[in-house]
Amino acid sequence: MDPLRNMHSITARIRANPVFAGIQNPPEVSINIYNDTGSGIQSLHLADLQAIGLDPWYPQYGGFIDTITLFLAQGQHTVVPRFHIQMKIEGLQGAQLTQLTDWFDALAVYDPSGGSRLSGNEMRDHLYFATAKGNVELYAGQTKTALQRRLPAI
């Protein structure tokens, strides 16, 4: 059984937090993440961190906080580095990718498994999410009213 079968992918742009990076416009990269309400912190791959200057071993910019113990769904745990980053969420409007949020601060961890990137809590502070009957499509809105307008009529 595919554990991601009922999860939906979202496009996000990430960058080092400018306050900790010490520069106004740090490099940014676009990634796909899974909207996982059970995940409390954004997970990133090594290539993501390297692209935004936060390589855990050779950082270009500040943003490393500490290491934390990450508890995984299978009951295992691992110690991983934690970082300050910024994100903005993008979504499809018709066939066009459009910005859904401004930059917001988030905490992220390096996921050495290279598995799917799972969302953190912070994006749910900026957007409302819903799925329609059948869980086929993920809908997002900045307000509940905007979200309701996007949902299909029943």
Image: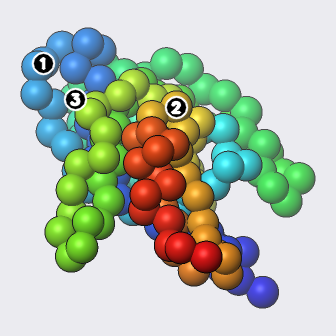
Horizontally, residue 126 falls left or right of residue 129, namely left
Residue behind mark 1: 23
Q: Where's the N terminus, which quadrant? A: bottom right
| Residue 130 in the image, given as x and y percentages of width and height | 58, 58
Q: Which mark is residue 125?
A: 2
| Residue 114 in the image, given as x and y percentages of width and height | 52, 63
Q: Nearer the viewer, residue 111 or 24?
A: 24
Q: Where's the C terminus, which quadrant? A: bottom right
Q: Is residue 143 among the parts visible in the rendering? A: yes
Horizontally, residue 111 falls left or right of residue 105, namely right
3 or 2: tag closer to the N-terminus = 3
Which is more foreground, mark 1 or mark 3?
A: 1
Residue at the front extreme, as displayed: 154
| Residue 8 in the image, given as x and y percentages of width and height | 54, 68
Residues marked 3 and 2 touching at CB (< 8 Å): no
Horizontally, residue 124 falls left or right of residue 64, namely right
SS under mark 1? loop
Which is more foreground, mark 2 or mark 1?
A: 2
Residue behind mark 3: 60
Residue at position x 53%, y 73% from top? 153
Q: Amino acid at mark 1?
A: Ile
1 or 3: tag closer to the N-terminus = 1
SS under mark 3? loop
| Residue 26 in the image, given as x and y percentages of width and height | 15, 31
Give the CA separation, mark 2 to mark 1: 26 Å
2 or 1: tag closer to the N-terminus = 1
Horizontally, residue 90 falls left or right of residue 34, namely left
Q: Quadrant of residue 56?
A: top left
